[in-house]
Image (cartoon, coloured by chain):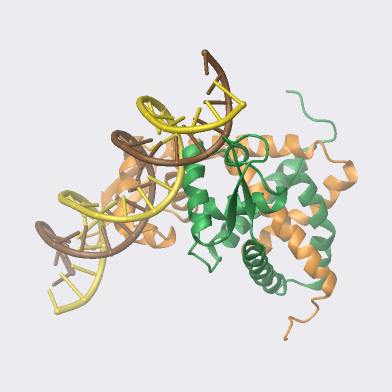
Chain colours: A green, B orange, C yellow, D brown
DNA sequence: TATTGTTATACTCTATAACTATA
DNA sequence: TATAGTTATAGAGTATAACAATA
């Protein structure tokens, strides 16, 4: 069987360990979020909107792998809470532009810092050597996740 | 503000990088699973059952953070596919014992190896130095996730 | 009387199909 | 005629409440 170059049997163990660790940590991170008022789909859409900037509902639906009617509903919920603003599209009167508000930024920042605080406290239970290993690995893991 | 001992400002950046990487990688791992016939709740319950061994529906519901009626439904689906067996509880005739079958082990193993293959291929796009960093970090991340 | 598990029912979320308005 | 977004409706999945069996 063909293998990627440089992939050894010991990688198989490491890959499995990495996968289990990532899945479990992500599950715990997801589970510890305190603000339960906003659904996961809403939160994810808002995050994408904040990261990529204003876009049309259709574009956002494609990016979130959700059907347009679902996005209509998601945007409705976000609008109700003042987290996004809908404006007419400058060129095409069929389309609209969804823009995140300042309130959205504050909310996302609060959510992020809460998660980071939790993770920091958890990492505080590791030894200094272990934390150093994670400090080095963090950018690599980030790169891997975005390949 | 009180901080854990040994947590420096540069840790704040690393923690954020780690969190984003973990969440994104987990999302992609979840998304790439091919066998869509079984729901996420069913798969998770089966995994717990396999990891922790046979238990009652109530216990499983608590471990999965799901209400008893939902667990009844989940177990029903697993039973239909021959992945679990229900037996009378030896001591208490109100309770039952849910046991994973040999088929369940095969299915979970197939699912695991598929995910590992995907992750291995992704890691193949990194440099040897980067892979070495992840090899070292994998057990630490695993430990962190299970603290 | 308390507890385990199930059934009945309602609610949330998402999808597909039909509709309205613009292009 | 095609496209962007919405509305109408149906299908999963989950929860709460009521129930049956057992402790």
| Horizontal side, residue A72 vs residue B57: left or right | right
Residue at (71, 70) in percent of width and height: A123
- Residue appearing at x 54%, y 53% in the figure: A42
Q: Is residue A67 in view?
A: no
Please tell me whether residue A8 is drawn above or below residue A2 in the rendered image.
Answer: below
Residue B28 coordinates in the image, percent (x, y): 64, 42
The image position of residue B30, as x and y in percent, is 58, 43
- Give how far across and how far down residue A33 sits, in percent: 56, 65
- Up the image or down, B11 lies above or below A27; here it is below
Quarter of the image with the C terminus of chain A is: top right
A108 to A120, vertically: above or below: above
Q: Position of residue A130 (x, y in %)?
A: 79, 66
Q: Is residue A95 left or right of residue B81?
A: right
Residue at the spot 79% in from the left edge and 76% down from the top edge: B7
Q: Quadrant of residue D12?
A: top left
Q: What residue lies at 48% left-to-right and 64% top-to-bottom?
A: A37
Front position in the image: A83 or B65: A83
Q: How many marks?
A: 0
Compared to B145, does A96 lie above or below? above
Question: Residue B98: in sight, yes or no?
Answer: yes
């Amino acid at each position: 069987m063909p293998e990627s170059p440089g992939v050894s049997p010991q990688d198989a163990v490491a890959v499995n360990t990495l996968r289990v660790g990532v899945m479990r940590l992500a599950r715990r991170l997801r589970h510890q979020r305190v603000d339960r008022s906003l659904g996961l789909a809403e939160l994810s859409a808002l995050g994408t909107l904040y990261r990529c900037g204003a876009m049309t509902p259709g574009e956002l639906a494609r990016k979130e792998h959700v059907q347009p009617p679902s996005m209509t509903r998601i945007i409705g919920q976000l609008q109700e809470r003042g987290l996004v603003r809908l404006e007419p599209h400058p060129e095409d009167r069929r389309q609209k532009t969804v823009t995140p508000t300042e309130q959205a930024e504050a909310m996302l920042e609060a959510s992020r810092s809460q998660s980071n605080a939790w993770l920091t406290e958890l990492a505080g239970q590791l030894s200094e050597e272990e934390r150093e290993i994670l400090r080095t690995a963090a950018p690599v893991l980030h790169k891997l996740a975005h390949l």
